[in-house]
Amino acid sequence: MPLLCLALLALPLAGCLQPLYAPAGIGVDSAPLAAELQSIAVDEIPQRLGHYVRNELIFGLNGTGSQPPPRYRLMVTLRERVQTPILDTVTGRATSATVIVDAEYRLVTVPQEIEVTKGIAFNIASYDRFSNRFSNVRAARDAEIRNARVIAESIRTRIATVMAARLGPVPPPVVPN
């Protein structure tokens, strides 16, 4: 009986939520948000970490391989720092390291340069350090790649949220009688 009451209380809310990437409805453009995200051109980002972040952003915003004309431009500035919080008391070497990356992004319209959104995304990735320096270099690079993926996903999600709000509320689909 309590389960039935709970189901009856939840029934009016059944159509209230719409997923962020859901199609708009029957008979209209099926993916207006996807089309808006595909029209974002990502500027070059310097350094190796910038290369990783840019590639992840391009794939996340437009994974189709199509080249629609850009209506927006995304500029990203990265700041990276490494901290070694744990030291071995015998050797005096760091046993772990933390790569901290801050990404300041700004999305503007292409012809008018009107700012659509801006913000800061950040991530922290740790790795263990060993006496072999090649393993340390590879571990540091893996931490950079992990940071790049998380930062790109965070930027993409924030931009998609702003773009979805700009597109306005989506009318419910028309069901023929």
Image (spheres, rainbow, N blue to C red):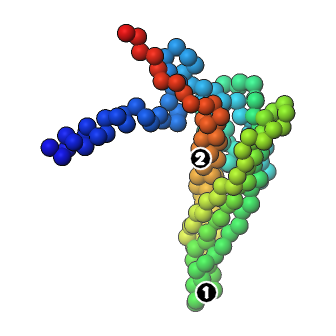
Locate the N terminus by quadrant.
top left
Inspect the image, locate mark 2, and give the three-letter code of the amino acid beneath it: Glu
SS at mark 2 in the image: helix
Residue at far bottom of view: 90
Task: Give the mark nearer the N terminus: 2 vs 1.
Answer: 1
Left or right: 173 as drawn, with respect to 14 = right
Q: Looking at the image, which residue is at 56% across and 31% down?
A: 169
User: Toward which corner of the image does residue 111 lie, by quadrant?
Assistant: top right
Inspect the image, locate mark 1, and give the three-letter code of the amino acid beneath it: Thr
- In the rendered image, residue 175, in percent from the top left (x then y), is placed at 41, 15
Q: Residue 174, relative to residue 48: is it above or below?
A: above
Q: For mark 1, does the 10 Å Cα neighbourhood hold few (<14), some (14 to 19), or many (20 or more) residues?
A: few
Q: Which residue is mark 1?
A: 91
Q: Pick the residue in front: 145 or 43.
A: 43
User: Toward which corner of the image does residue 117 lie, by quadrant?
Assistant: top right
Residue 55 can be seen in this image: yes
Q: Which residue is mark 2?
A: 153
- In the rendered image, residue 90, in percent from the top left (x then y), is placed at 58, 90
- In the rendered image, residue 149, in percent from the top left (x then y), is placed at 60, 50
SS at mark 1 in the image: loop
